[in-house]
Image (cartoon, rainbow, N blue to C red):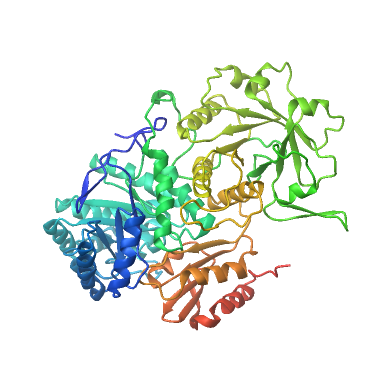
Amino acid sequence: MLQQYCASLTDYKRLKTREVKIGDLLLGNGHPIRIQTMTTTDTMDTAATVAQTIRCIEAGAELVRITAPSKNEAENLRNIKAEVRARGYDTPLIADIHFTPNAAEIAARIVEKVRVNPGNYVDKKKFDFIEYTDAAYAEEIEHIRKRFTPLVRICKEHGTAMRIGTNHGSLSDRIMSRYGDTPIGMVESAMEFLRIARDEDYHQIILSMKSSNPQVMVQAYRLLVQKMDEEFGECYPLHLGVTEAGDGEDGRIKSAIGIGTLLEDGIGDTIRVSLTEDPEFEIPVCKDIVKRYSTRKSGLIVPEEQLALPYNPFVYKRRATEAVGNIGGGHVPVVLADLSNTKNLDVNNFRDIGYKYDESSDKWHINDGAADYVYTGDKMPDFALPGTLQVIVHHTKWKALEDKTKCHPLYVTEEYLAANEQPDVMHFVMITPWKNYGNVLAEKLKSNKNVVLLLSADDNGFGHVRKFFSMLAKHGIHCPVILHGDSHAPSVDEQLIAFATNTGGLLLDGMGDGVWLTNDIGWIKNDKITGRTYLEVKSNEQFLNNTAFSILQATRTRISKTEYISCPSCGRTLFDLQETTAKIRAATNHLKGVKIAIMGCIVNGPGEMADADFGYVGSGPGKITLYKSKEVMKKNVPSEVAVEELINLLKEHGAWVDNG
């Protein structure tokens, strides 16, 4: 039996899963984490699909998925596969199926793997609530068995693998009626199909639990692992991904938080990063995520029996803390900026962390992404700062200051333990969780009501941090904790992934009352692979500050900007998704807290919009349907005026503010 949901809560150990053969590729059972993507071309355009498939393979994709929404596209997979093989590529191809069982049965005879979505393969989704008796529910399961079993038998006969891919936003009315819009509903949706496959002695199965919300996604995968272990005594390989993650840095951060959190626990056998960009641009991000675990060694951090997990990994609940100032308690997580390496502090330095000084009016202008605290090391600004910003300096500098108003001391752990007395004001202590301080640190913290901990959360994994939070819980210590992420990675993508995984994963588990990000190489302007600039920032300080707020936004712990739920393009997309996403983002990116979904077709909406406030969904060539939540508001809007109509819809429902 597993420990709750993974092989180890403290040591990095890959979850043991069944081995699945996809063509000549082996997946699961300790094989390397495989990288995959999905084409965005029209599947009926054989030449374009073959060309893009080959570009993806040459970029590093080990599996390539192609949409097959009808029997025609499924049949054309034969031509696509033949041409790809004729060009000398043997990479397995996957057919993506949603509403058409007949297309799946055709594709399963052609390609190496088919993906089915249990939410819409047999069931219907009309957003109806239906009261089911147990007998009526069992009847529905039998209906699924009759419709799904032929595909299982075809796959078994032809040696075709299958992914049972649940999506949070496309749970069927039947599942929603019994389980609600919940992670356990996602799990049960897949388990119904998996049980049928096992009854047919078919085991070439991979499963996924995708959501645009990393919190829901992580909980669903954990529950799925636990459920398989309890019911079958074994686990099937898992395909990880955050669906509709979006583009740019937000898409990378959201994907890294969801995928990275599970990989840290050893969960995951293949990944896909779903970006609203050309599919070949997904591959470098996948590589950077997987690279973190290719050389990760197992090495016991703390005996398992000594660890009492201080939170429920299946339900989000923020760790209870006693507030120190505006940190912890019921306050939103804070962002701590770092200007300690700035030689000469002036007002312009603070522009990069959200504070703009207007000399003519002698006033500060503060934006929604303004840091709450700033660490300046051994320097203290010699000018008046805005009232919302508080300064942290090294404790030796703090002691020498005459005016300590709005200024707080910082200690490293050894300095804190050596101090004869504790300050009677807010102070910060930097903690290295893998060091053994015995009970000395715990005893000192127990009597301290003014301390905020700065806990290192880096590439050493979650085990050390879990051990430290377990210690705090064991000793009844409720001081706030700010997560300190430090990256030495050589590219923007790798830094985003490191920061998002190391701090975001802990925030998903309710651990952390703030984020502090630092690096030692300065801001790298361009991505090392594509040369594209993803971050429109002026300095390293601005990059780190923006990233911290984006991590809090992606974990839903602090909302500071508009959120976009944007699907990756595929052959079903009915408009230029990248161009449209850019237009909508430019027009609406000042609407703090509003969630806007941009979906290429009906498969990815309205169900896949999940918890979006407003939706922009392709309904036909050149036609858009606009939604408020899951309710249709305007049908078949010409795409030329659809963005303007979306703005009108936002105004009609009080979600619009002028960008002044």
Q: Is residue 373 shown above or below 433?
A: below
* Residue in view at x 62 percent, y 64 percent: 589
Asked which quadrant contains residue 234, the reply is top left
Based on the displayed image, in which of its 4 quarters is residue 122 positioned?
A: bottom left
**Residue 382 seen by the camera:** yes
Q: How far across and how far down the image is residue 215, in percent?
A: 47, 49
* Residue 153 located left or right of residue 486: left
Left or right of residue 588, residue 66 in this image: left
Q: Report x, y in % for residue 177.
A: 38, 61
Horizontal arrangement in the rendering, residue 388 relative to residue 249 (left or right): right
Quarter in which the C terminus is drawn: bottom right
Residue sitting at x 50%, y 49%: 493
Q: Nearer the viewer, residue 495 or 88?
A: 88
Residue 551 position in % (x across, y down): 56, 49
Who's the residue at 52% across and 43% down the image?
490
Residue 360 falls in image quadrant: bottom right
The answer to whether 123 is drawn above or below residue 290 in the figure is: below
Q: Is residue 202 left or right of residue 383?
A: left
The front one of 387 and 548 is 548
User: Does residue 484 sit above or below 636 in this rendering?
Assistant: above
